[in-house]
Amino acid sequence: MTPFRFLVGARGFHDRRALIEAARAAEAVGYSDLTIHDHLTPQLAPIPVLTAVAMATERLRLCPLVLNNDLRHPAVLAQDLATIDVLSDGRLVVGIGAGWNEPEYRAIGIPFDPPGVRIDRMLEAVAVLRGLFADRRFSFDGRHYTIANLDGQPKPVQRPHPPFLIGGTRERVLRIAAREADIVGIDLRQDRESLPDAFPERMDVRVRWIREAAGDRFERLELSVLRLLGDIAITNAPLRVASELARRYERGTGLTIDPRDILESPYSLIGSVPELVAKLRRNRDRWGINSILVGWLDEPDLGTLAPVVEQLAGM
């Protein structure tokens, strides 16, 4: 079975020492990946952050979650990412997406193309990255990018290339991720339309899309849940906590949710330590989900999950 991984995100850091201390603490507990979003907001830029963490840790994988393809030319990005892989001794994950935050595009004068165009451009970028990571000169003549006999340097440590992560919520993107990525990120929008996707029967459908599109690749894929439903709660009264969360969602969306559905959701972490250990094992057995983004380095409840992480990380 694919081993369990627990991902944590970096946000709110503007101080090197605080970032490094938090990353090292997460690594010591057994968290597997440090992630960071890619937005033109008041945050540190993802590539320098991942480089800094690479130089200060030994085991954490380094995962942009995810890089907006439209903000960087893939040939430039290939050099940046390969450099991180070299400096980390092979711990990079190439998280890449098609871009979605329209106000950022408007703010810097980049056309916000329809989703299909942005997705097609991302797929070309993935092909360019793979080509420049390979041990040969590379040429590419696509609709969006042209590469003429370029030998990408440096070459990443991981061969033939670092793992790619593509994530999404909709069927097309999940099927693309199943075909093109090594890690399929299963995200969740928490609005009235999308919230039912959090529950087991809808996850059955999503994983069926992934399995159909992946074919023989499915058993080699990592499946990662990229969002929590509510907060982490280590408790001996999980139904009470889930009932409170269901009422909160009902006030926000108008949906009536059975608290037991929240407890069974692959997106929730509510229960005692033994219950959560057993649940995560069931999720892997049923859906192949082996990793989950559990929160942020600066959140106090991150430490409460440590007993679960210590039992399952790498198992």
Image: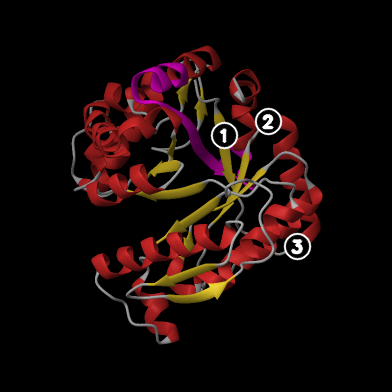
The amino acid type of the residue labelled 3 equals Asp
Residue 167, position as x, y percentages in the image: 39, 49
The amino acid type of the residue labelled 2 equals Gly
- Binning the other alpha carbons within 10 Å of mark 2 as few (below 14), some (14 to 19) or many (20 upward) gives many
Q: CA distance from mark 1 to mark 3?
A: 24 Å
Mark 2, residue position: 30
Mark 1 / mark 3, whichever is N-terminal: 1
| Image quadrant assignment for residue 116 | bottom left
Mark 1, residue position: 6
Residue 218, position as x, y percentages in the image: 37, 31
Residue 204, position as x, y percentages in the image: 25, 28
| Image quadrant assignment for residue 184 | top left
Q: Quadrant of the C terminus?
A: top right
Q: CA distance from mark 2 to mark 1?
A: 8 Å
Q: Residue at x 75, y 33 (%)?
A: 28
Task: Name the residue nearer the viewer: 305 or 120.
Answer: 120
Mark 3 / mark 2, whichever is N-terminal: 3
Question: From which residue to which does the magenta span run?
Answer: 280-301
Mark 3, residue position: 15
Element type where label 3 sits in the image: loop
Q: Nearer the viewer, mark 3 or mark 2?
A: 2
The chosen color scheme is secondary structure
Task: Name the residue nearer the viewer: 292 or 166.
Answer: 166
Element type where label 2 sits in the image: loop
Element type where label 1 sits in the image: strand
Taking the view exactly as shown, the residue that stands out farthest to the bottom is 109
Say if mark 2 contacts mark 1, CB within 8 Å.
yes
The amino acid type of the residue labelled 1 equals Phe
